[in-house]
Amino acid sequence: MIDMIIFIFVLIFLYLLMLRGRAGHPKMEELKKWSYAHRGLHGDRFPENSMGAFRQAVEAGYGMELDVHLMADGNLAVIHDSSLKRTVGVEKKIEELTAAELSAYKLQGTEETIPLFADVLKMVGGRVPLIVEIKTDGKNTAAVTEATCRMLAEYPGLYCVESFDPRAIAYVRKYFPDLVRGQLAHNSLKEKSPVPLFLRFLLTYQLMNCWVVPDFIAYRYADRKTMSNFLCRKLWQIQGVSWTLTDMEQYETAINEDWIPIFEKFKP
């Protein structure tokens, strides 16, 4: 009986250790002062992740969340999906293209084209903070993470990085330890996915935190009420980021629960 109690306590202790993160990054308080437009302030006029949507967010005084992919020529493009099918209507992958080819691809029937990350940074110019999601394809994790962090190192504004891929955030921890880093997560156990079940379990319940040691956890709003989220925030004091909020009720709930808000489809 004593052995069983000791075993249970050891398991609980290990579980709590696996949830650990890094609290108190000096830039986190500044990042918390803003609300973030998901893929820019997009809508009928400007598509997601377009220069127009980013200009709209800057002019409205919102921070922005955006996505970066590594292209064939080593440049970084700002687009959510690897495939261009949804946003452009063609069967191409962004990783196959070069910067010189981007102007040929119009976003969602508009005159907006897929922007380069360098051009977005130049346009924003440090006026609002950025949450930069690093998109990996399973093979280029180190390369895309390195390119993103190197470019941000010369950017004068406030920013942080995040990724669903814990290998990317572990890379940031190792090679860019001072950069604010976050682990993206949601309850992937509820969805069909090619990702192995065991890995989805680890990511859903944040059991890889001990490897990446994140400054924040960016968790899907609808899935946020898990024991691991509660312990990450209360025990380890890891900041929470809530995505993607689609109305004022969700926004106010997230603010009251001390989540950094990422919103779309409305203006808070």
Image: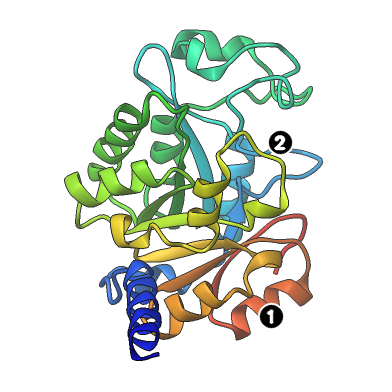
Question: Can the viewer see residue 34 in this picture?
Answer: no
Q: Residue at x 35, y 30 (%)?
A: 144
Is disc 1 placed on a helix, strand or loop? Answer: helix
Expressed as whole percent of the image width and height from the top left, the position of residue 251 reads 69, 73
For mark 1, what is the residue? 253
Is disc 2 placed on a helix, strand or loop? Answer: loop
Expressed as whole percent of the image width and height from the top left, the position of residue 63 reads 51, 58
Separation of residues labelled 1 and 2 (CA atoms): 27 Å
User: Split into 4 quadrants, where in the image is the C terminus?
Assistant: bottom right
Expressed as whole percent of the image width and height from the top left, the position of residue 209 reads 36, 61
Instruction: Check the image and name the residue furthest to the bottom.
Output: 2
Q: Residue at x 45, y 11 (%)?
A: 98
Between discs 1 and 2, the one toward the N terminus: 2
Q: Residue at x 33, y 71 (%)?
A: 20
Q: What label sits on residue 230 in the rendered view?
A: none
Q: Is residue 186 left or right of residue 4?
A: right
Towards the viewer: 110 or 253? 253
For mark 2, what is the residue? 47
Towards the viewer: 4 or 264? 4
Q: Which residue type carries mark 1?
A: Thr
Question: Can the viewer see residue 172 in this picture?
Answer: yes
Q: Is residue 104 left or right of residue 134?
A: right
Instruction: Check the image and name the residue furthest to the front.
Output: 1
Towards the viewer: 235 or 8? 8
Q: Residues within 10 Å of mark 2 (few under 14, many from 20)?
A: many
